[in-house]
Image (tube, coloured by chain):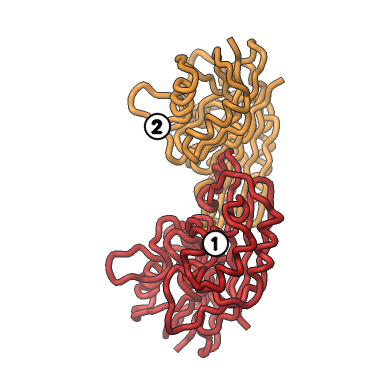
Chain colours: A orange, B red
Amino acid sequence: MRNIRLKICYEGTRYQGWQRQKTTGNTIQGKLEDILTKMTGEDIEIHGSGRTDAGVHARAQVANFKSHTTMSEYEIKEYLNQYLPLDIGVTEVKEVSPRFHSRLNVIGKRYIYRVWNSSEHNVFERKYMYPFLGELDFEQMNLAAEQLLGTHDFQSFCGKKIKKKSTVRTIKKLEIKRIGPEIRFIYEGDGFLFHMVRILTGTLLEIGTGEMKVEELSGILESRLREKAGRTAPACGLILDEVFYD
Amino acid sequence: MRNIRLKICYEGTRYQGWQRQKTTGNTIQGKLEDILTKMTGEDIEIHGSGRTDAGVHARAQVANFKSHTTMSEYEIKEYLNQYLPLDIGVTEVKEVSPRFHSRLNVIGKRYIYRVWNSSEHNVFERKYMYPFLGELDFEQMNLAAEQLLGTHDFQSFCGKKIKKKSTVRTIKKLEIKRIGPEIRFIYEGDGFLFHMVRILTGTLLEIGTGEMKVEELSGILESRLREKAGRTAPACGLILDEVFYD
């Protein structure tokens, strides 16, 4: 049995997220599995590095699947790109060790959240940005980012109650870059909870506008209450940029 | 009466082109006129530098309109961007001399045609490129580009029969750039006939694949017959990049 690793990019706009759903569902995983099942004649199940929500994009999602196919890496890539819709693309196909698992072996991820902070329209990249008006105080946002760095219990920044598993995560990098009217939030960490990047971004934006104060952050973290943190920033601004392995 | 000049960018995908149509019609000119008419309470008519076809994009279309409005340039721009859909944007508003006319004063235009020459998908820019497989001979395409440069009767490269007006145009620049898997055709000239850039690009691509020979070009030009030239490349790859004035 061969173990095949894929790198995949997609514009999430049209999809109900990464994960295949039993009921109706236009999902990235579903699209890939359907094509691979046709290609191999086997019942293919792929494992992604993690889910992305409906509307979230990816530059380099990673997934793997097991198959007896005799096709070369190149042939698999060509086949997939031939049958995939144009808003999903396979950028790399590689046969890997049988022990590799896209989700279990992840050691970190980078997400980028893009905000368009101008009343002018960004016509050509509008699908990849959250248009947000209002002046932002970068000093305050950077102070907040510094506090969020490191290891914390992020339950307050998680979109659902988690009881059995740990909600402790480590953010290794949280950079806020201004590129003209665009603000780019770059997050690197060992893992991110459900909606975590979007809630962190929503909270940083509220700190930027002054709706929320940096001083409130430690209380928000301690409370472990979702309602204490800021709003969930919309999916369209988020992109899974890279998944890290050993 | 003030004369107001606009610079406009748009993704043409959703539109039936620039020009307002009497019957149903989702057009860029129509959108702009409707908003300006509401804004001023006057019956505003705008003049574009020229039409763009259904599906063609613009980075910097130019248009002007006359109005008694007392609003500042800044206020007009903000108003327009507030009410325009996100796939149309106004990047500049400027009051100009009463004698300025967006179409009559044009001295040249630059169009860019983008081709995506790879079986890999360009997920994030796919709306702005024509995906074209097959190997291309750049030497032959460049030889052809050289021959097309300068002043010619381009009737063969025009999508409709023109009887009364001249079909002589001057191409001042025709550059073919390879940027990884992307091929960019850059056209500058004093003016372009209906579908001219798309037919030129289609013809250059046929020369690139070997379907057509460079040696046929002078015969094609002389014939003044549309059917002698290559196919019309699709609208999605074309962008009006700049309009030049004195």
Badge 1 density bin: few <14, some 14–19, many ≥20, Cα 10 Å: many
Q: Is residue A165 above or below residue A130?
A: above
Could you say which is closer to the camera, residue A52 or residue B25?
B25
Q: Is residue A212 above or below residue B88?
A: above
Q: Which residue is mark 2?
A: A26
From the viewer's perspective, tell me whether residue B219 is left or right of residue B36.
Answer: right
Q: Please tell me if label 1 and label 2 are on a single chain.
A: no
Q: Residue at x 57, y 26 (%)?
A: A76
Amino acid under label 1?
A: Ile
Q: Circle 1 sits in a helix, a strand or a loop, which is it?
A: strand
Q: Is residue A230 visible?
A: no
Q: Chain of mark 1?
A: B
Tell whether label 2 touches label 1 (CB within 8 Å): no
Q: Is residue B208 visible?
A: yes
Tally of marks: 2
Q: Chain of mark 2?
A: A
Cα gap from disc 1 to disc 2, whole angstroms? 31 Å
Q: Which residue is mark 1?
A: B239
Q: Which mark is residue B177?
A: none
Amino acid under label 2?
A: Asn
Q: Circle 2 sits in a helix, a strand or a loop, which is it?
A: loop
